[in-house]
Amino acid sequence: MMIPSLFSVSYAGLWGQHKLDTKQFIVKAAKLGYRAVQIAGKKPHISFNHITDKELNEIKDTAKKYKVEIHTIAGYNDFTSGKGSIGNPFVDIQVGYIKSLCVIAKKLGAKQIRIFSGYFYDLDNYMEEWKKCVEAVRECSEIAEDYGIMIGLQNHHDVAVSTESYIEFLNDVNHPNCKAMFDPWSPALHGDDLYQAAKQLASRMIQTTLADYVKLRRFAYMPGIVNYKPLPEIIKAVPIGQGFIDNRAFFDGLKEGGFKGHVIYEMCSPLRGGGSEANLDKAAKLSLAAIKELIS
């Protein structure tokens, strides 16, 4: 069974959009028709340094009152950071952060923690960065297992972002408590076959996150030759079904591969139409309808 879900980062104000606190977001999700949510493990939602048991109980009670499942806490790690300060235990600090989210997840009744791998800071030492991320993800998986929490790796950061390297990375981690949270938007940007990618990974997945985008071409004028030089395209968020990502092909692959899990909608970049509450709500409603159609 696939379950539509809304990510709290959509109402976090991080790109100038309308901001809600965690309880307000849960109420919003319920009113928009979502019965499940993923909550960001950072300010303004779950600040692991400041949140109290009283606040966690209030969040849990709000979710219960509005019949909304809190299924995942989203971590924001980068296991390759700190390259310029090798004496500082950056990986240990981030693993400790993920551990703190496991404690919070258990108190909220969430069953999963979303994590990333790492960005590239040293292209000449690719395999060193790879190894560092593999070991850190495996350590997180072992720690989370003690709390009864599953670790899910999202294909977002640079290390193992291509479909084939993502599969290779999961194989290297080789831990039963680490599952795939594979999304279509990065492979779509890479030009991958979304049907085949989804089919390959569906049986290893516990959730996927959807967004959709339009591509806007860019050019820089070169007066010396009276012509334009092409630049990387701008990618701008739109509701599901209004962009270039072939989510139908992706879901065909998920279904054939046997995926059962949460399907999350996120607005985690500037959205066409702006960041007003009304525009966010409109995009969330349109995207929920599109997700339900994709699931069916």
Image: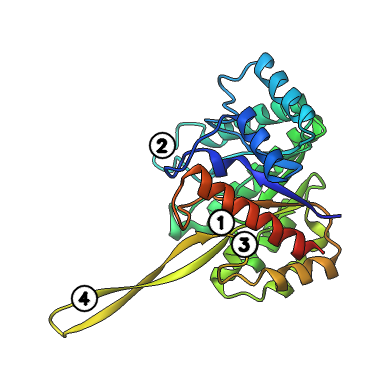
Compared across the picture, whether 18 is left or right of 174 comes to left
* Quadrant of the image occupied by residue 112: top right
Q: Considering depth in this image, is 91 or 99 the residue closer to the camera?
A: 99
Cβ–Cβ below 8 Å for labels 4 and 1? no
Nearer the camera: disc 3 or disc 4: 3
Give the image's coloring scheme: rainbow
Give the amino acid at mark 4: Tyr
Q: Quadrant of the C terminus?
A: bottom right
Identify the mark nearer the N-term, 1 or 3: 1
Disc sitting over residue 240 in the figure: 3
Identify the mark nearer the N-term, 3 or 4: 4
Q: How far apart are marks 1 and 2 (CA)?
A: 20 Å
Query: Residue 49 at x, y = what percent?
Result: 56, 21
Give the amino acid at mark 3: Ile
Identify the mark nearer the N-term, 4 or 2: 2
Q: Considering depth in this image, is 87 or 264 the residue closer to the camera?
A: 264
Mark 2 — residue?
Answer: 85
Nearer the camera: disc 4 or disc 1: 4
Q: How far apart are marks 3 and 4 (CA)?
A: 33 Å
Mark 4 — residue?
Answer: 221
Q: How far apart are marks 1 and 3 (CA)?
A: 26 Å
Compared across the picture, whether 148 is left or right of 263 comes to right
Identify the mark nearer the N-term, 1 or 2: 2
Q: Distance between the residues labelled 4 and 2?
A: 40 Å
Mark 1 — residue?
Answer: 159
Identify the mark nearer the N-term, 3 or 2: 2
Q: Which secondary structure, mark 3? A: loop
Query: Residue 23 at x, y = what percent?
Result: 64, 28
Residue pictured at 75% horizontal, 23% vertical = 61
Query: Residue 146 at x, y = what percent?
Result: 80, 30
Query: Residue 161 at x, y = what percent?
Result: 59, 61
* Quadrant of the image occupied by residue 58: top right
